[in-house]
Amino acid sequence: MTRAEFIENTLKLSGLKPSKTTPPAGTDWADHEAAGYIQLGYEMGMITGKDEQQFKPDQVIIRQEAMVMMWRILQLQYPSELFTDVKLAGHTDPWAVPAVQMMAKLGIHGPEVKVLEDGSIDLLSRKPLIRQEEAAIMYALLTQPTDQIVAELMAAQQPQAEPAEEAEAAEETSETAPIPSPAPVPSATSAQ
């Protein structure tokens, strides 16, 4: 699986059309068949880097690169701080750690991912991404309840009130809340 194939497939899965902007002259993707999707990836912020002339579209993509591309979009919706407690195993480059942590916790990966005895997760970050794994990632992007997972993570990080405090708050509310009066019922004599 190449870098161009991954960016094109991911953006197509999202229902996006290729960019109509002509890629800058001198880029290594200007004449590539996926140029419109690569350009869109740059425009959306999925692809960044020091050298905006070299995307290396036909180079094999490694897993951590794929995770970072997806993370750059998902972090706009889900705060990366929610995922810092994910323990990683194996070798992940420092620039990819936040992305790999998020994808691990959200379950956006294939079945080849290993959970070790100590609870750490090895996403095999430096391995090339193969088509079967990309298919599993694409399926997970469509089916994982990411909003629910994030809501649960956020709820778990909220300070929990002590049961006694909750009971006191309930008593105060019931003591101070006005008691609604029943609606007047018209009498049979008033209707005449």
Image (spheres, helix red, strand yellow):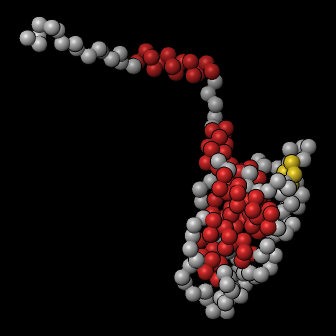
Name the quadrant of the N terminus: bottom right
Name the quadrant of the C terminus: top left
Q: At 73% across and 84% down in the image, what residue appears? A: 54
Horizontal side, residue 89 vs residue 156: left or right: right
Q: At 67% across and 57% down in the image, what residue appears? A: 141
Residue 159 percent location from the top left of the image: 63, 34
89 over 12 or under it: above or below: above
What is the residue that sits farthest to the bottom in this orientation?
Answer: 26
Horizontal side, residue 71 vs residue 120: left or right: left
Quarter of the view holding residue 99: bottom right
191 over 28 or under it: above or below: above
What is the residue that sits farthest to the left in this orientation?
Answer: 192
181 over 59 or under it: above or below: above
Of residue 148 and residue 79, the one placed in the foreground of this image is 148
Of residue 60 and residue 98, the one placed in the foreground of this image is 60
Kindly tell me whether residue 53 is visible in this rendering: no
Residue 161 percent location from the top left of the image: 61, 27
Horizontal side, residue 134 vs residue 185: left or right: right
Give the total number of marks visible in the rendering.
Answer: 0
87 over 61 or under it: above or below: above
Residue 29 percent location from the top left of the image: 69, 86
Q: At 72% across and 77% down in the image, what residue appears? A: 4
Q: At 86% across and 66% down in the image, what residue appears? A: 126
Kindly tell me whether residue 69 is visible in this rendering: yes
Quarter of the view holding residue 187: top left
What is the residue that sits farthest to the right in this orientation?
Answer: 117
Of residue 45 and residue 14, the one placed in the foreground of this image is 14
